Image: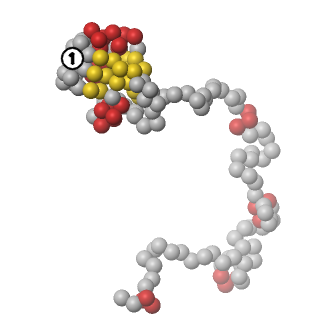
Amino acid sequence: MRIDTLSPAEGSTSRVKRLGRGIGSGHGKTSCKGHKGQWARSGGGVRPGFEGGQMPIARRVPKRGFHNKWAKHYTIINISQLDKLPAGTVVDFGYVAENSLAKEVKNSAGLKVLGSGELKTALTVKAVKFSETAKTAIEKAGGTAEIIE
């Protein structure tokens, strides 16, 4: 292989469209812009979202809702999911993420345990938040519910 024989892969490059370079080029005279009008002018055209002077749809439709940028989103898990685990297991955010026990674990402020279902095995659960029913169910089954920061 020599440096003078190197060339780009087939189809990876395309020729530049040279406008206004004579009738033989096929892009002469009006440079593919047609005759007159806003789009044929230098600097012509309109900004994105412009609707010809009528009130744009973004301004006609009323604003709705509110997005709290300081809201904390927790990874939610129910005690019914924990009932399937062997006794003595230490359940924390890392364990939930590794074993895919929750649907959504990314961008989370931590683990929150809810009390839906029934728990019969003694587990050590470490989470940021517990519901009252979840905490009592874990302790009733002989496990511990530890709140971590």
- The residue under the point 35% across, 14% down is 134
- The residue under the point 48% across, 28% down is 73
**Residue 19 picture quarter:** bottom right
Residue 77 seen by the camera: no
Relative to 15, is 111 on the left or the right? left
**Residue 87 picture quarter:** top left
User: Which residue has dot 1 on it?
Assistant: 121
- The amino acid beneath tag 1 is Thr
Above-or-below relation of 132 to 113: above
**Residue 32 picture quarter:** bottom right
| Front position in the image: 133 or 23 | 133
- State the image coordinates of residue 40 (x, y, percent, origin top left): 77, 65
| Front position in the image: 105 or 46 | 105
| Front position in the image: 29 or 122 | 122
Location of the C terminus by quadrant is: top left
Location of the N terminus by quadrant is: bottom left
- State the image coordinates of residue 48 (x, y, percent, origin top left): 70, 50
Report the number of numbered marks: 1
Relative to 126, is 61 on the left or the right? right
Relative to 107, is 91 on the left or the right? left
Residue 87 seen by the camera: yes
- The residue under the point 43% across, 88% down is 3
* Element type where label 1 sits in the image: loop
Instruction: Check disc 1: other Cα within 10 Å, few if <14, some if 14-19, many if 20+.
Output: some
Q: Of all residues shown, which one is farthest toward the left?
A: 86
- State the image coordinates of residue 84 (x, y, percent, origin top left): 22, 23
- The residue under the point 42% across, 37% down is 106
